[in-house]
Amino acid sequence: MKVTLIYDNEVYKEGLRADWGFSCLVEVENQPRILFDTGANGKILLDNMKKLDIEPETIDEVFISHSHWDHTGGLPDFLKVNGNVTIYSPSSYRPPKAKKIVNIEKATQIHENIFSTGELMGTEQSLVVKTGKGLVVIDGCSHPGVGNILQAASQFGRVYALIGGLHGFREFILLKDLELVCPCHCTQRIAEIKRLYPEKYVEGGVGKIIEL
């Protein structure tokens, strides 16, 4: 499994552009390529994709965590380039027209070993991928709370890794049993997470590739 950060508040690889928002490409062997969220600005999204040698036409599906502009703003421009995708949307969001739109409310299996937590607290869904090491959870902003997200994901197995925005999260004990944490985007206490869990912490930023 490989996760490539395309849109984030910070830059990891020189030559790419940071902006407030989040998007990543999720690649699982023998499964469709999934674009998780689309950042705030389509031009920045597509430009970063080009520099990362990610062709929009090769993406099969788009998974939208929640309706906020910094996670959906790039979607219209992306669909102009590739409208032949399936969009997995939380039921509270109405995406632009695409080949197929799947509205998700409850926990759902999307593909073999790939799941949605369902739309938690009516606001946000997270993507869950089952690997040989455990579950990899990818979230947008953690609006329902990291604890609720991890609990919802755990119905599919043991959570191994957490990647994405954690907002004002401060219940750091919840990360104790994880083996990898990559806090991105809106996370307010990245430095504290890094200090408490240096062995688990993975730096984010546009261009970062995490292989699991």
Image: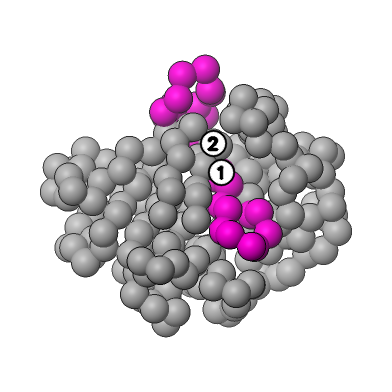
Q: Is residue 52 magenta?
A: no
Q: Nearer the viewer, residue 18 or 34?
A: 34
Percent position of residue 33, x then y: 66, 54
Residue of label 2? 7
Q: Residue at x 55, y 37 (%)?
A: 6
Q: Residue at x 42, y 73 (%)?
A: 153
143 relative to 107 in the view: left or right: left
The magenta-colored residue range is: 8-34
Residue of label 1? 23
The three-letter amino acid code for the residue at tag 1 is Ser
The colour scheme applied to this rendered structure is one colour
Does the residue at mark 1 contact the one at mark 2 (Cβ under 8 Å)?
Answer: yes
Q: Nearer the viewer, residue 53 or 178?
A: 53
- Which residue reaches farthest left? 196
Q: Is residue 14 magenta?
A: yes
Q: For numbered disc 2, what is the local secondary structure?
A: strand
Up-down relation of residue 13 to residue 96 (above or below): above
The mark that comes first in sequence, 1 or 2, is 2
The quadrant in which the C terminus is found is: bottom left
Q: Quadrant of residue 98?
A: bottom right
Q: Quadrant of residue 64?
A: bottom right
